[in-house]
Image: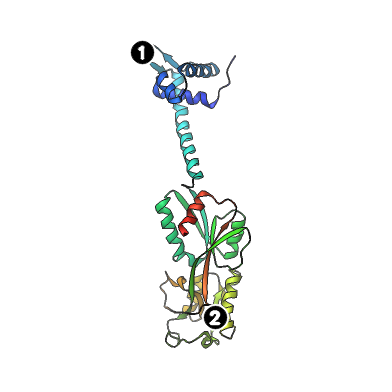
Amino acid sequence: MKHQYELRHFRYFNQVAQDLNFRRAAEKLFITQPGLTRTIQQLEDHLDAKLFIRSKKKVSLTPAGDYLFQQINPLFNQLSSIADHTKRIALGETGLLKIGFVGSAMQRIIPNLLVKLHNKYPDIHTKLEELSNTRQLELLLANKLDVGFVRLEHLPDQLNHKVVFREPFSLVLPKNHWLTKRKFKNLAQLQNESFILFDPDYSKDYYDQIMDIFRAAGFLPIVDHKSVHANTIFRLVENGLGISIIPSTLQEGFNLPLKFIELHNPLAEATLTMVWKKEAPSKALHHFLQQVE
């Protein structure tokens, strides 16, 4: 009667084939030598093939045994690697983090966090995508994004959040604009100017905050153009099509003939918030969140 073989039959065979010594292989497998011999005999019986030639002086592989060893040894090496990688994923030492962000988060916050993460967990990789605030929330709730960086005041109950950065807003003006830092008193000086603003579809909360800044100055702006990309806004301002208001760090990384006037106003403060789903964050995400602390 043939014995049904299991993974352990091949694992035991693989160890004996490596050592060519039943006693040494049994010690490594933590079984008795007679138990190892029986298991190899069961495998040979099932395969109808003799796998080893045993004499008093040595153990050697038969041609069938040598073929089997050449086929399964790489598989066991791969299986060991898979098991190790699985363990490291469970511990959060490796894996892929999908990160969404609004453009200004890439100026300082995210690069600094990624450097810290890489120094501590070099095998955690990231996929970064610039997305609107609304799109980030959609992907987070659908488990297609691990963490996001948004400019929103109102967030779904399913998400955790942490404010990671506060900064002032700045006016964006063409280089030759009549207004200078010395001449600037308040926004009311610009009530007859055309403005270029981020589209409310990008973030209604953000757009409403900008409108509140104008209301506090006593007027609503003339909005001639809207965009969701800072570079587009800067190009339009550069070409004299209007002026804009942006979070101050957004100017970093651009070298255009523009000037910026920071708004020193407690109401005019841009907030960047990190958001992630409440339910069971992965260990890799947990390590990423720790870098924020």
Return the mark for residue 73. Answer: none
Residue designated by label 2? 195
The residue located at (46%, 37%) in the rendering is: 81
Q: Mark 1 points at which residue?
A: 57
Please identify the residue farthest to the front as the structure is shown: 293
Residue 67, position as x, y percentages in the image = 45, 23
Q: Residues within 10 Å of mark 1 (few under 14, many from 20)?
A: few
Give the Cα separation between the discs numbered 1 and 2: 92 Å
- C-beta proximity under 8 Å, tags 1 and 2: no
| Residue at image coords 59%, 62% | 135
Earlier along the polypeptide chain: callout 1 or callout 2? 1
Q: Which of marks 1 and 2 is in front?
A: 1
Q: Is residue 3 above or below residue 199?
A: above
Q: What residue type is labelled 1?
A: Lys
Residue 226 appears in the picture as rendered: yes
- Residue type at tag 2: Phe
Occupied quadrant, residue 209: bottom right
Q: Which residue lies furthest to the right in this view?
A: 157
Q: 2 or 117: which is nearer to us?
A: 117
Q: Residue at x 52, y 25 (%)?
A: 8
Element at label 2: strand
Neighbor class of circle 2 (other Cα within 10 Å; few <14, some 14-19, many 20+) is many
Residue 221 visible in image: no
Residue 57's image quarter?
A: top left
32 to the left or right of 205: left
Residue lying furthest top: 56
